[in-house]
Image: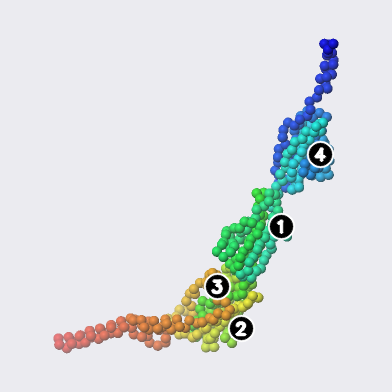
Amino acid sequence: MFNRTVSPRFVFMFKQDVVEEPEFTDVIQNVTVPAGRSVRLACSVKNLGSYKVAWMHFEQSAILTVHNHVITRNPRVSVTHDKHRTWFLHISDVREEDRGRYMCQINTVTAKTQFGYLHVVVPPTIDDSLSSSDVIVREGANVTLTCRANGSPKPTIKWKRDDNSKISISKGHSVSEWEGEVLDMARISRLDMGAYLCIASNGVPPTVSKRVKVSVDFPPMLWIPHQLVGAPLFYNVTLECFTEAHPTSLNYWTRDDGHMIHESSKYHMDNTVGTPAYKTHMRLLIRNINTEDYGTYKCIAKNPRGESDGTIRLYTSSPPTTTPDPRAITLPPASKPPRRDTPLTDKGTKYQSNLNEIDKGKQKTDEGGGKTPLNWVGGASQVTGDDADWRRSSLWVLVLLIIITFYF
């Protein structure tokens, strides 16, 4: 009953109805692309026949393309194929929201799918609205600087000083650079004044930075290298003061009667800005000194934070016995201004002329044995001990010559 011969025609028709289902021939490669570039994802299939390929953004549950048609309204998305074997999803001007899993699907009875991941990297950008701007603080206050940055991967933040000086975090703790969004500095000083760089990087060029200027305000302070200055009549002399102040101070000179000194044929004033810029070297040149010029002079510095002054006494002295042609007093070289580590004299400190030291120096010279130095006083010079011995020796020789002549 079941042993009947099958017709060859039936076998042929059966073979025609057996069709291989489509399948994927390769995986979808994961792709990393910087924002703003274009990217292409490839889905390779075989035996597609009358079936269709669709692309979807899995996280967004959005159908992007079906066969040759673009379904999404995103104008940056398009689709092409290579003779129905490889289907390409194109995304131009890639944005951060484009990252995620992309699914390629074949619409068989039981849908066949595979995934590829699109990584979108974004170079860092600093959010100015959430970051510190330039700050002005009083000396001794605490300072907090903040820097927020966006990007993918998340950027790391580090702080450096613009001049490569060390960052003072607290007393006794200084670093070349500081890592983190927040930079805290305790009891800031004038040495911490300057520009700080917030640098954001995440491995995606370019690295970006923001410059934050920190200004430290403090009242003027003075240092005077020579508080007692001697100069002869009709000579020129220069008085000096060194100041530190921020904001920049108003600097000027007065006489002991309180009257301000102005530029004239008698006086010339010069202020030289030092390094750092909060330092100033004040000079007062007094020409052709006469009797009325002797007395007390004050150098004064004022800024919104306070004021300070220092006193210099100009007294008469005798000219040297031999004088070079220039008629000017050359003061002994001043010691260098103290480092900021040692505070300068502030207002209220008395500027005392060290007259005791002068007297002690004179006393040591008078009490010292041996030769007595020549004084810068007019008139004949004193005869030293060696000169007197030489004269006594000459006298004895003369007496001896007279005796020999008389007897012989």
User: In which quarter of the view is residue 59 placed?
Assistant: top right
Choose the circle earlier in sequence order: 3 or 2.
Answer: 2
- The crowd level at tag 4 (other Cα within 10 Å; few <14, some 14-19, many 20+) is many
Query: What is the CA distance from the residue labelled 4 to the residue labelled 3?
Result: 75 Å
Mark found first going from the N terminus, 2 or 4: 4
Query: Do the residues bearing badges 1 and 4 touch, measured as CB atoms within 8 Å?
Result: no
Please identify the quarter of the rendering in which residue 189 is found.
Answer: bottom right
Q: Are marks 2 and 4 in contact (CB under 8 Å)?
A: no
Q: How many marks?
A: 4
Identify the mark nearer the N-term, 1 or 4. Answer: 4
Q: Which residue is mark 2?
A: 260
What residue is disc 3 on? 343
Provide the residue designation for mark 1: 127
User: Which amino acid, by three-letter code, is at mark 3?
Assistant: Pro
Could you tell which of marks 4 and 3 lies nearer the N-terminus? 4
Give coordinates of residue 336: x percent, y percent. Answer: 51, 72
Q: Quadrant of the C terminus?
A: bottom left
Rendered position, 173 above or below 88: below
Q: Indicate which disc, 1 or 3, sits on the residue closer to the N terminus.
A: 1
Element type at mark 1:
loop
Q: Which-is-in-front pick, marks 3 and 2?
A: 3
Q: Nearer the viewer, mark 2 or mark 1?
A: 1
69 on left or right of 385: right
